[in-house]
Image (cartoon, rainbow, N blue to C red):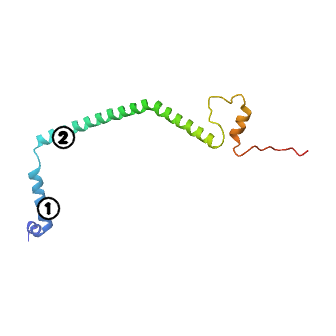
Amino acid sequence: MTDNHQHSDNAAWRAAQQWRERVQQTRPSQRTSGLRLLFTWLLFGIMLIVGTFLGLFFLVIGWAMLPFVRHRMKKRAEQFRASQAQYAGGTADHDGAHAGNTHSAGRSQRVLDGEYEVKNHR
């Protein structure tokens, strides 16, 4: 038996040969393949450039929005502190109404439940 005859009986070999023939038939000509490759690379490059510009655009928009977001978060933190101070029995005045009495204001900030004193035993 020849080598060709041996392979023609093998189903896997026949399938591989048919697949190889189909690939040869569907393969485009060399000129269209080069044009297609060039067009693909141009499209890919354009997409990279557009993506870069979009990324930079959204980065600048984010940076421009940072002061507004910071202001909103600051207001929210002030409201939270004011509500916590009211809940603890303090005052929510932040405009300095009790600025003259700094000692008692500092003491009320540190002690929530009551006033405690340490007595000397002399």
Residue holding disc 1 = 16
Q: Secondary structure at mark 1?
A: helix
The location of residue 36, given as percent across then percent down, is 16, 40
The mark nearer the N terminus, 2 or 1, is: 1
Label 2–label 1 contact, CB within 8 A: no
What is the quadrant of residue 118 in the picture? top right
Q: Where does residue 23 sit, x and y in percent of width and height? A: 12, 54
Give whichever of 15, 71 is nearer the camera.
Answer: 71
Element under label 2? Answer: helix
Residue under label 2: 37
Determine crowd level at label 2: few under 14, some 14-19, many 20+ residues with C-alpha closer than 10 A: few
| Residue at the spot 69% in from the left edge and 44% down from the top edge | 112
Residue type at mark 1?
Ala
Quarter of the image for residue 108 reads top right
In the displayed structure image, the side of residue 74 where residue 85 appears, left or right: right
Foreground residue among 107 and 30: 107
| CA gap, disc 2 and disc 1 | 28 Å
Q: Quadrant of the C terminus?
A: top right
Which residue is found at the position 66% from the left and 39% from the top? 90
Q: Using the image, determine if residue 48 lies above or below residue 2.
A: above
Query: Dot 1: within a 10 Å radius of its alpha carbon, few (fewer than 14), some, or many (20 or more) residues?
Result: few
